[in-house]
Image: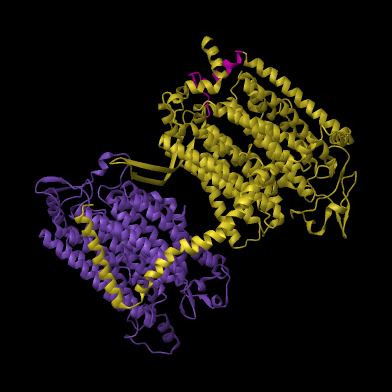
Chain colours: A yellow, B purple
Amino acid sequence: MIELASLSTAALHLPAILGEGAHAVTIPSAIASPEFAWAGLILLLPAISAALCGLCAAFGVKSKLPGAITAISLIAAFATTLSLYLKMPADAPRVVHLFDWIDFSWKTGGATWTQFLAPFSLYIDSLTLLWMLFVTGLGSLIAIYATEYMEADTGKGYARFFGSVSIFLFAMGSLVMGGNLILLYLGWEGVGLASYLLIGYYYNRPSAVAAAKKAFIMNRIGDLGLALGVFLIWINYGTLEYDGIFKALAHTADPASGASWSAAMIPYCLMLGAFGKSAQIPLFVWLPDAMEGPTPVSALIHAATMVTAGLYLIARTYPLFALEPHALTVVAIVGCSTAFVAATIGMAQYDIKRVMAYSTVSQLGYMFLGLGVGTTFGAVYHVFTHAFFKALLFLCCGAIMHGMAGQLDLRKMSGLRNVKGFGVISWTFLIGCLCLAGFPFTAGFFSKDSIIAQAFASGNPTFVTLGWLALLTAFLTAYYTFRVWFRVCGGPTKYEPGDEMHGHDDHGHDHGNGHGHGHGHDDHGHGHAAHGNHEWHPHGPRLAINGVLLVICLGAVLAAVPAYMAMRGEANWVETMVQHSSAALPSAEHGHGGEHAHHALSFTGIEDVHKATSVVASTVGILGILIAAYFHLLNRSAADKLRQALLSNSLTRWLPLAMENKWYVDEVYHVVFRFPASVLGHVFHFIDKHVIDGFVVNGGARVPLEVGRLFQPLYNGALQGYAATMAGGIALIAAWVFWIWLHGS
Amino acid sequence: MSARLTLISPEILLFAGSVVVAVLGLARNPAMRRAVPFVTALFLLASIGVTAYVYRSDAVETSGLMLPHLGGYAKALLASIGILLVMLAGPTIDRRLEEAFDAGRASFDPIRVMRGEFFAFFLLSIAGTMLIANAADLIWLFLALELASLPTYVMVAVSRGTRRAQEAAIKYFFLGALSAATFLYGFALLYGATGTLELSKIAEVLASQSAAGGISTLAIVGGVLSVLGIGFKLAAVPMHFYAPDVYEGASSATTAFLGFVPKVAGVIALMVLLAVFGFDGHTVTAGGSTIVMPGLPAPLAAVLWMVAVLTMTLGNIGALLQRNVKRMLAYSSIAQSGYLIIGLLSGPEAGWSAVLFYLIGYGVTNTAMFAVLASLERNGEDVETLDDLAGLRTRHPVLAWMLAASAISLIGMPPLIGFFGKLSLFSAALGAGHTQLVIIAAVNSAISAFYYLQLVAVPMLGQPNARTETVQAVPSAWPRIAAVVCGVGVIVMPIGVSKLVAAAGSSLPEGKIVASTPSAAETAIAKR
């Protein structure tokens, strides 16, 4: 017990203890496993599918073939992942070398050779498998959903859409499964490209194009950080292979003292990359705008998978972060602030997809908080549960939008649970909301709870403060989540259709400006609204959408099972997975194995913290739901009255305004970055036009041209001239050589 | 000796092929004449197979060559690119004449048909280039170089029926003779300085001279003249003057050939020649004692340095002025030779393998560009100026994309093959301590972007005009197929980049060089 007790204290100040004894991190060295070469299929199948979709687009296929190809190949990739998970021994990470990709050697100083090696190899440990399971699993489900959702675009953008989705899955696979940081970078840029293509899918809509550009540029800033981090890792450790980096770290005896500034900068650079991709402060503003893309894309890329790439990066290179004492604290602070700020914005949005987008930003903040306070398990578990319930929520939003002709404003829809065809949506939506709100005994509750509990249990005053903030955020989350559900699905049935800018409704082209005249009211679920000479009624989804909703809903519910197993004293499946990966914490690796250490913690007071946190978190969650119920179900006018009251008081009016206007972050960025950049751009343009082009190009860079003209007479086409010039050239060069030779070079 | 005979079996095969093709081209039956390009490609394909077989046997080690494995790589490369070049040239040679025969406007006349001759010379030139890799003495080297050169003069002359082609051929021939005289003079001086014609014996004598205080002036002068003379094959300064006129005068398909095969000939000849002088840290066994070479003689290194700088700079600057795409590509090919010479200067371990690797990418890219040009015609004439290509994307999107991909690859943009070529060349040069050269080369790459990007921008973004309306695809699909194969290769080859680098590396002494092995520098140049 003494040893166990010391373990628990070791767990209290995690970054510090990691700094002192990083040699405690023992990641088993990888075993080369060529027998698992078939794991490459997980990457190959989406790549083939992307190529086929490209061909379909080139040949103008007018059927749903691209959707079928993508869905089948993704399901096959999921099956491959599943069998890989079943067959892979958990003892040590496996490296599967597929083929040599880049291999260069050059001399550095005298006779030593330096080799730059980036083989196309896979690094497979339980973290990889966990990620790939939900990436390919959700990917295939969402592809099935999209076959129905995107049907209005059949023969137009259909192949382009599914081609981009396939590129995304290939890139995500390379990001997660790649055995070195080059492949991770390849995948990182690949998912960025896919995201750009899909956000800008409706490319004739200016807002979509602007959102795509915004996402791309914001991500570039983060990618710069990642690239610098990769360069620094190469400089400091001489390898980009995960296995090599971990081995090099194990040989670093006392990292705290001997670390150069460049080694110390690594986690901060990687962090910037992670914050860009995972939409954290200060780079979070692109994600809500990314909702301009088709909803299945929002569900897959901008909620469940791609935005967790930043988490994956940090979890994968956790030993590097553990070396630098303040790095994890920064991650925790940024994560928690993002969670809070995004939640406050989410409270005041009327577009249900935007609420979900801000909630994604907020939940990602929780995950970073988890990584920062030292519970990689909590963070990864929250990634896992969030992937399911957030995908579910987005798909529900998408189904509503699909059926309601693009309507997303929660003030214009109500009581959808009673509308024919929207039953499955409403109730699965409710389950998703319960998970997101952290309602007791749902998956989201357990995962969020484990993060908040660790913040309190750490004993670090900073982390405890962050823990309180996280609790407050949990309250806000419950409120804004149920604000949406009570508004949209609860209350009297009443709705008006959207203006169908998304073009996937059969009646879409008939509406004209549906915002203006659309108003349906019918207790029997047959909304009637006159639109020109047509009657409009919402149409519920068919099998592909409803089936996928039910399956993902089941997944969201079952995601809680690992936590129940832990309550019964068995190993939490996710925790076992995390502890067998590079994201394992040193305390758990002291010979007992992950589960043992977890139990050790249970005996030494952390259990009490857990219990207390659980009780408090459930309370604030239920409180949030109740308040939402009052304002948005029972007494809807009260919400408006409250808003008016706040606005009329000059002391409090900033609150609703700031929240509704997203804390003016976009405006601040506009003033601080975009406006100066734009001014600078105009200045540069002026300089470019009148100084560079006018002077340097037409003057300075004209030198090559003039030099060229100088020599032009030599190219006069006369044979004798050429021969004379050649002979003269030889003579000149020979003379020059002998001149320097004689004068001693 | 029999070992060396075994090694030249691919060349013997191609000689046989050239005879077959020459006779076939005179057949009365038009189907047989049409078969000429296919038979040519077949012989090239067979020579790849023979090369692969022969260079796996013991003959390689017992051949007594200084660079025994070089031939295997060079021959496979030449024959593979050769097949692509046949796809370009096949439909263009004699096209008018054959059409006239078919239409009954002319009756068959064996004097007037050129296709058989063209492809016979095509095969002979490739065979000559292959033979250079097998040279064990100066006579062989000279004859092989001439065998590689002489057929190309005829090819230029018959490539199209205009007087410009004949003018270009005459210029090419006389200037080629000048260069041959130059390097022959160099060879003679080398013989005078060492008293032997055998390359490995020359290496021994030079090593003993070097150990005894320094290589004799005569040998160095011989070396300098040989390098400058062989520079003609590479279109290196000051022997580059012919390139723009000849490239412009010959048909696009022939220009593609001139842009690649003579360049490979020059590179291999320079490797064979420079190996004699020895690089830093190489050992040569002479008279029972092992001599560690101090490196290339300073004047020779200085000449290569100067030639590299001048070649890439004058090439890129010259290209800036051109509106004629073929002239632009001629200057671009001059500039590319400058990069290759940097690699040659950087030593056999990293530099030469980088050069050989670069040649793959360059060969494919060069063929892709000229294949695009060869796929188009305007009023029955070759498409030549940038204006002809304006807005190509709207009419021939695939060709425009292939042209863009190869131009971007030549700039050296990742992830295309050209990037990896330049990366390996420049890192080899840095490793050999030629930092200044790399900086100059990087500046040159930036300058070159100016005109390469025109080849992207004009076809992609340019507006089609009345002139481009008359530009159309040639009837035969083969040039287009070659363009697509090469263009896709430019994009796809980076996936297998390490295999290609390894293949290039293993064709040089000591095989592939592995990281952080100090002894790797002590690459011994094998003595017989």
Magenta span contains residue A600: yes
Q: Is B510 in front, or is A718?
A: A718
Note whether A158 is above or below B98 in the view shown.
above
Q: Is A419 in front, or is B363?
A: B363
Q: Quick check: B177 left or right of A158?
A: left
| Picture coordinates of residue B247, whole percent (x, y) | 38, 72
- Residue A456 in view in this figure: yes
What span is in magenta? A583-604
Image mark count:
0
Q: Is A209 in front, or is B121?
A: A209
| Picture coordinates of residue B353, whole percent (x, y) | 32, 52
| Picture coordinates of residue B217, whole percent (x, y) | 15, 58
| Picture coordinates of residue A277, whole percent (x, y) | 59, 41
Q: Quick check: A169 left or right of B109?
A: right
- Residue B474 in view in this figure: no
Tell me which corner region of the image, top left, top right, bottom left or bottom right, holds residue A487.
top right
Q: Quick check: B406 left or right of A492?
A: left
Note whether B72 is above or below B386 in the view shown.
above
Note whether B191 is above or below A343 in the view shown.
below
The N terminus of chain A, quarter of image: top right
Q: Is A224 in front, or is A568?
A: A224
Note whether A71 is above or below A703 in the view shown.
above
Residue located farthest toward the top when viewing the structure as drawn? A2
Magenta span contains residue A567: no
